[in-house]
Structure formats: structure tokens, C-alpha cells
Amino acid sequence: MQKKILIVDDTKSWQVFNKEVIFQLYGNLFEITTASSAKEALSIVNKNIESPFDVILTDLQMETSFEPKLAGEWLIEQIRSIPKFDSSKIVIVSAMYNIEIIAKRLNVECISKNLLINNKLLLKFMFEKIKPLLSNID
């Protein structure tokens, strides 16, 4: 069965970048869905309750509806409140300077966009780190 990834970013070029990197690294092993906002992503998550995403890559800074929280923070909290998504792995992909602090507080992984743009293998290293979840990836 194909693993499922949700990519959440308000910048279309980052959605495309992440999809292309995943395809270059893994071919068609993943079914990839994209969302352009935290609200859209939560709607997609709710439509996939019976077949949760294995991995969710999310930006932090998107719509401002959730201030003082960042949209990505709000989204992660909402996903974490859905029991069927307990085994989903969440990775923040953001250019925020304090990404590691936020990721640690939310108990998720993170990759800096500033580093990822220059080293696409960081995404592969992250997937290897979470490989027990993605057990059928070679």
C-alpha cells in the first residue's frame, strides 16, 4: 500500500519543490497531497480520518488567522488532537529562525528551508530518521 504525505505551504513553489524532491528520492512510493493553508490542510486531514497521512510536512508561517500562534503551530495542535493521526509523523519545513524551539515544544521534527534548498538530501535523512514509521521504504 502506498504511503501518504500531506505537504502544507502557502507558497506554491515550495509545494512543488517538496513534491519534486520526494519524487526524485522515492519515485512513486508516496501518494502526495498538497494544501495552501492550515485551514485547507485541516479540512483535508478530516476527510482522510479513515486513512491518515503517514507524514505531514508543514510550513509555520501561512495565514494570520491564528495569531498569536503561527498557522503551522495551530495545525499541528489540531492534528495531534485527532486520535487516528497519532502515528502520523509531522515535520516542520520552515525558514523561521526559531524553528527548532517550536518543533521541540510541539514534539515534532523540523528542517530549515534555508538548509533544504541547498541540500535536498536533508529530506531523505529525515525520512530515514522516521523510517520505522515508513517501514516499506528501501
Image (cartoon, rainbow, N blue to C red):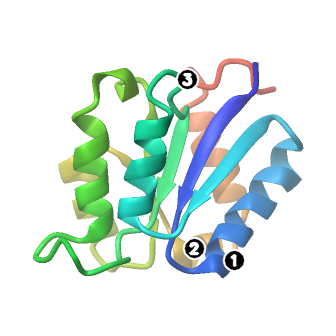
Q: Does the CB distance between marks 1 and 2 fall below 8 Å?
A: yes
Judge left or right: residue 120 versus residue 96: right
Residue pictured at 75% horizontal, 38% vertical = 30
Q: Residue 128: give x, y in percent of width and height.
A: 64, 36
The CA span between labels 1 and 2 is 6 Å
* Residue 43 place in picture, x, y as percent: 41, 50
- How many callouts does the rendering have? 3
Q: Is residue 136 above or below residue 82?
A: above
Q: Tell me the SS state at disc 1.
A: loop
Q: Say which of marks 3 and 2 sits in front.
A: 3
Regarding residue 99, the answer to whether it shows in the image is yes
Q: Nearer the viewer, residue 126 or 80?
A: 80
Q: Position of residue 11 (x, y in %)?
A: 56, 80
- Residue at image mark 1: 118
Q: Where 94 sits versus 79, above or below?
A: below
Say which residue label 2 marks: 115
For this rendering, which residue is in front, 64 or 125?
64
Query: In terms of secondary structure, where does tag 2 sit?
Result: helix
In this picture, residue 121 sits left or right of residue 59: right
Q: Secondary structure at mark 3?
A: loop
Amino acid type indicated by mark 3: Leu
Q: Residue at x 68, y 30 (%)?
A: 3
| Horizontal side, residue 84 vs residue 81: left or right | right
Classify mark 1: residues with Cα within 10 Å, few (<14), some (14-19) or many (20+). few
Mark 2: amino acid: Leu
Residue at numbered disc 3: 133
Q: Which mark is residue 34?
A: none
Q: Which of the two discs, 3 and 2, labels the residue nearer the N terminus?
A: 2
Which of marks 1 and 3 precedes in the sequence?
A: 1
**Marks 3/1: CA–CA distance:** 26 Å
Report the amino acid beneath label 1: Asn
Callout 3 crowding tier (Cα within 10 Å): few <14, some 14–19, many ≥20 = some
